[in-house]
Image: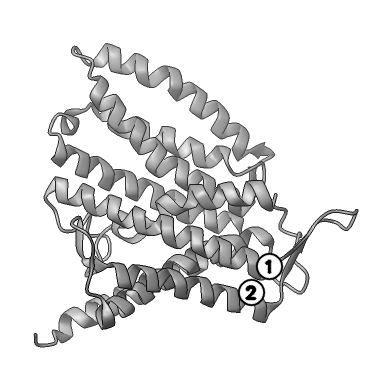
Amino acid sequence: MALNLATLKTRSLTAAIFVVVMLTGLLWNQWSFFVLFSFIHFGCWGEYQRLIGLIDPGYAKITPFHKYGVRVAGWSVLLYFTNDALQIGGLSLQVLGWWLGLLFVFVLPLAEILLVRDLSWKNIGYSALGLLYISLSWGLLTNIRCLFPENLLPVGSLLPIGKLLVLLTVGSIWINDTMAYIVGSMIGKTPLSAISPKKTWEGTIGGIILAIVVMGAAGHFLDYHYRDDGDGGFNWAFPVHCMTIAAISSVAGTFGDLLESKLKRMAGVKDSGSIMPGHGGFLDRFDSLLLATPFVWLYVFLFLK
């Protein structure tokens, strides 16, 4: 196949912009992180509702209040999981998220009853699944970022723990995706799933192993350690956490990729959206992170908090 220079140029420029925007949001501060993932949250919701509407035309007919109300209700989850780290004029975003979410718990069902003659529990179920799939995942990722104080640094680190954990999760997924593609292209022969015929077992396993090795080596090289304030608490070797989170992110992220591929196949579309020319939409870019985040958050909550 001849190399399309125009397509390559578009993809490269889009990828460069994407990397710059992502790194700025991830690395600047907690506010930049919250703004970035609020934008991603609403973008994912728009594509999710479009896909479900193609799969089940009945969902495409939901009222505008249902369509946009559930997005705002989901955003209240992100607000709540800021863990009281972000405030505006003395008002905690966590408190705002709590009351906003509580309001929508009552208002959305009531509005559905009043505005729709034939109440569709199936449509409510689709939206509820979206809250779990998108809003809860981004809420938990926000919680990882805001769970630890900004001045709590691992020994020898210049970055806060929350920032390190998010970078570790995102980096593991990026490494896994890249290595899985390279290994699969070189030695892949056994299809992983009919959902995504281009994925192979060889590439998938190779990507996971290489992500674990690279993140473990990075943790060893940086020689970070997590510990509490020094009052007799625990002391964890950072490379072990790097390898564990890399394994969790890679395995769960692979299932996340397959899940989004299944949704697109059911909807009969190639890409979930077109926000990134040459790369697809929000769900195409963040499908792995959406499913990996809850499992990483659970690990962090059980072993690092």
Q: Are marks 2 and 1 in contact (CB under 8 Å)?
A: yes
Tell me which corner region of the image, top left, top right, bottom left or bottom right, holds residue 98: top right
**Tag 2 residue:** 219
**Tag 1 residue:** 238
Please give the name of the residue rendered at 52% of the width and 65% of the height, measured from the top-left corner.
246
Q: x%, y% of residue 173?
A: 44, 65
**What crowding class fits label 2: few (fewer than 14 Cα within 10 Å), some (14-19), or many (20 or more)?**
many
Q: Residue furthest left?
A: 1
Q: From the viewer's perspective, is 148 left or right of 67?
A: right
Q: From the viewer's perspective, is 182 left or right of 28?
A: left
Q: CA distance from mark 2 to mark 1?
A: 6 Å
**What crowding class fits label 1: few (fewer than 14 Cα within 10 Å), some (14-19), or many (20 or more)?**
many
User: Looking at this view, is 87 or 238 the one in front?
Assistant: 238
Decide if residue 39 is in sight here: no
Q: What secondary structure is marked by label 1?
A: helix
Q: From the viewer's perspective, is 50 left or right of 213?
A: left
